[in-house]
Image (spheres, helix red, strand yellow):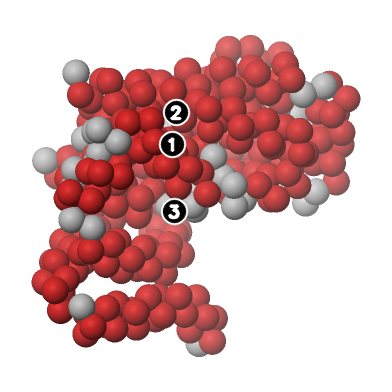
Amino acid sequence: MDTLLLYLVAAICLAWSYRKNRQKTTTAMKKAFKAFENILPQFLVVLILVAMAMAVLDTATISLVLGRDSGVWGVLAASLVGAVTLIPGFVAFPAAAALLQGGAGATQIAAFVSSLMMVGVVTLPLEIQFFGKRAALLRNLLAYVFSLIAAVFVGWVVSS
Amino acid sequence: MKPVVRRYAAVMAAAAIFIVFLLLLPLYRARAVATIAFQAETMLLVIPPIFVLLGLLDVWVPREQMIRFMGAGSGARGGLLAFLLGSFAAGPLYGAFPVAAVLMKKGASFTNILIFIGAWSTTKIPMLLFESSALGARFTLARLAIDIIGIIVIAAAIKALVPAAEVRRLYARAELMD
């Protein structure tokens, strides 16, 4: 259903763009392909790793670590993993969905998704280069704390 | 040819590990193959329209024009614009830093820069479509709502906690970058 909607939106935008300006549309498609090809290697690696992880970790194990009853420790573990990893959303969301289906709790998955997006430990040196130590460290620290708050909120909304 | 090989080196290593995994652990073989097939199928179905949208956004949203409206006196409208600019962007968060430097150079205010970074990290529209198809609309909308609050709170906190002299230094440094 969502996928169908996505195709519909993309098709309408593409048709509009093509009518307006053919050349721009061609450029856009080239950029689209390049962007796709750029994430493809990362995407394939994570695809393979997730497949192996999901094969070994059965529902019971996931529930134990990230499940509804894993509580504060599950949320903290998920948010720490999110903070230190650098995975594009295209890859992270399906993995998160797979974990969710495998028995992970919504709060734990929300903690992972939020900190993955907002906190970037790996890219901190780059951020410092542009924003200075003070602003960059502050942003990541605040974002980490906030991702925990966001997780509790999302978990509450999804489960209620 | 060589860059391609290097870029896909990690993929080949992972594939090799996967093959060894399948050979050594027949117990998990069926599940591993089923998972990878299911994931790949989902991806291949969902990815094309998203990248079409990303490409179109990149080409049609005029960045230079928006920069003018995000200066220090731009108020709530400038903040909204910074938020939208970040939301319509594409790419990982570290891609936002160079753009932020350009915005600083063109005179966008520090608060708007922080809002822009926040939006880029969490409310990118093509990503939201993708997130909602993977994790559900309820999850996505709840995260979006709380994160919009977070973006504003974090921007205000950083603005308050970083001294003006440091901000001036950052702007001066952005001026030197190309």
Residue A69 is situated, as x and y percent measured from the top left of the image, at 25, 33
Label 3 or label 2, whichever lies nearer to me, is 2
Per the image, the residue denoted by label 3 is A87
* Label 2: element kind: helix
As drawn, the label of residue A76 is 1
Same chain for marks 2 and 1? yes
Q: Nearer the viewer, mark 2 or mark 1?
A: 1
B108 lies above or below A105: above
What residue is at 21 percent from the left and 85 percent from the top? B23
C-beta proximity under 8 Å, tags 3 and 2: no
Measure the C-alpha gap from mark 3 to mark 2.
19 Å
Do residues under tags 2 and 1 come within 8 Å of each other at their CB atoms?
A: yes
Residue A148 is tagged as: 2
From the top left corner, tell me how far across and down residue B41 is, in percent.
Answer: 17, 62
Residue at left 34%, top 79%?
B17
Q: Position of A130 compared to A69: left or right? A: right
Q: Is residue A136 left or right of residue A111?
A: right
Q: CA distance from mark 2 to mark 1?
A: 8 Å
Q: Residues within 10 Å of mark 2 (few under 14, many from 20)?
A: many
**Which badge, 2 or 1, is on the more N-terminal residue?**
1
Gap in Å between the C-alphas at discs 1 and 3?
A: 18 Å
Q: Nearer the viewer, residue A144 or B42?
A: A144
